[in-house]
Image (cartoon, rainbow, N blue to C red):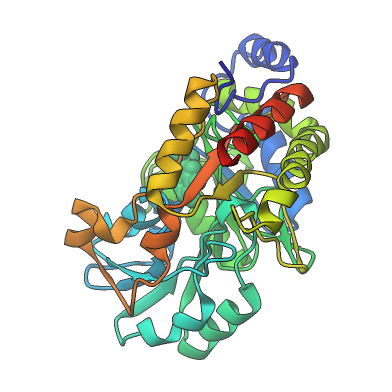
Amino acid sequence: MIRFNVPPFTGKEYEYIKKAVDNQKICGDGEFTAKCNEWLQEKTGTKKALLTTSCTHATELAAILADIQPGDEVIMPSYTFVSTADAFVLRGATAVFVDIRPDTMNIDEKLIEQAITPKTKAIVPVHYAGVGCEMDAIMEIAAKYNLQVIEDAAQGIMSSYKGKALGTFGEFGCFSFHETKNFSMGEGGALLIRDEKDIEQAEIVREKGTNRAKFFRGQIDKYTWVDKGSSYLPSELNAAYLYAQLELADEITSDRLKTWNHYRDGFSALAAEGRIELPFIPEHCTHNAHMFYIKARDLEERTALISHLKANDILAVFHYVPLHSAPAGERFGRFAGEDKFTTKESERLLRLPLYYGLKEDQTEYIIEKVKEFYR
Ligand SMILES: *Cc1c(COP(=O)(O)O)cnc(C)c1O
C-alpha cells in the first residue's frame, strides 16, 4: 500500500529529543524552541517568529492580537481548512467567504473588494499547496480600506511570492507543523510577526497573559499576570523533533520537489490531451512542493479514479468540503458574491501521495496507474 502521507523523519529527532530530556527542560521555550524560532526568523526574514502548539492556535493568537471582536467580518476563501475560519469565529466574528481562482485554488484577489463592508476587519489569504496568493493586490486593498492581513501560510513554509517568504506580508503569518505538513513536530505551528510593536503583546498572550518572556530575558525581576491570554507554547520535546527537520529543510524540500516534478512531467501528455488539469504555479511564485494534485473532469470521474487507485494499493485523497456549505459555515459565515469555482473545483481535485522519502519507482507506479485509468 502506498500511503498518502508519511510524517517526515530524518533520524536526528531521537538525539534531539534525548537532549531535551537530558537538559531537564521539557516544557516550552527552552533550547530547541529558541533554535526553531531563530531558524524561522532567519529563513523568512520576519521580525519575530514564535513556535505555537498548532497553526490553528497561531491563527487564534493572531485573531486576539488583531483585536477581532464580535460582529466583525473577516474575508477568506471557503475552499480551506476549518481552522482558517474557526480562529475568527471563536472571537465572535463572521467569516465572509470569497470565491477562488480555478488556476491556483487561492482566493480571487479581484473579488475581495466587493466583499468589504463597514464591519470588515481583516483579510485572510490562504496560500493553498504552498503557492502564493496575489499578495501585491491583497496588500493594496488592505491599505486602501485599513484592514489587517493574517496569512494562513499553514502549507507555505519555504515558499515565496516575488522573492519574499509567504507568511511575512501581513501583520501576522501562520505556519503549521502538523504531521501532514512539509516539516513536522506532530502537532505544532508558528506565528510570524511583521511589526516590532506587536511582539511584546504576542509573547504575553502566548504565555497565559503573563510577562514571563520578559522575565526570562532578565528585563524584569518577577513575572506577573498582565493581560488576557492562553497557553500557546509547545513542549521542548516537540520542538526538538521539529528542529531536526529544519536543519535538513533544503534536503527535504528538494526531495519533495523531485517527486512533484516527476508527477508533472509524467502527466504532461495527459494534461495536453485535456483529460486532466495540473497545478499552476505563477511565474513570480516559488513553491515548496507541499502538494501534488490533479483535477478530474467532475466528481463522478474523481470517485472512479480514487477507487481505481485504491484497487491498486494507492491512497489518494481529496479535500475540502467548502466551508460555506458545512453546518458551522452556514451558521458563522456567508458567501459574498457567486460560488463559481469553489464547489465545482473542490469536487474535481485529487491529491496524490507526496512525502519526504517517497521513492521514484513508487511515483512512477502511481503515474502509470492514473494513466491506465484514462486509457
Ligand atoms: C493544516 C492546515 C491548518 C491547520 O494546521 P494545524 O497545525 O493542524 O492547526 C490550517 N490551515 C490550512 C490551510 C492547513 O492546511
Residue 336 placed where, x, y %? 31, 77
Is residue 185 shown left or right of residue 112? right
Q: Quadrant of residue 36?
A: top right
Query: Do we see residue 223 in this rendering?
Result: no
Q: Residue at x 60, y 67 (%)?
A: 133
- Give the vertical position of 48 relative to 54 (above or below): below
The answer to whether 27 is drawn above or below residue 306 in the figure is above
Instruction: Work out whether 321 lies above or below 181.
Output: below
Q: Residue furthest bottom?
A: 144
Q: Position of residue 59 (x, y in %)?
A: 44, 53
- Residue 341: percent from the left, percent from the top? 43, 67
Quadrant of image for the N terminus: top right
Quarter occupied by the C terminus: top right
Residue 51 percent coordinates (x, y): 57, 40
Left/right placement of residue 153 relative to residue 121 reads: right
Residue closest to the eye, 126 or 31: 126
Toward the viewer: 33 or 164? Answer: 164
Instruction: Identify the residue at horizontal 27%, vertical 66% (top origin).
Output: 93
- Is residue 241 rendered to the left or right of residue 316? right
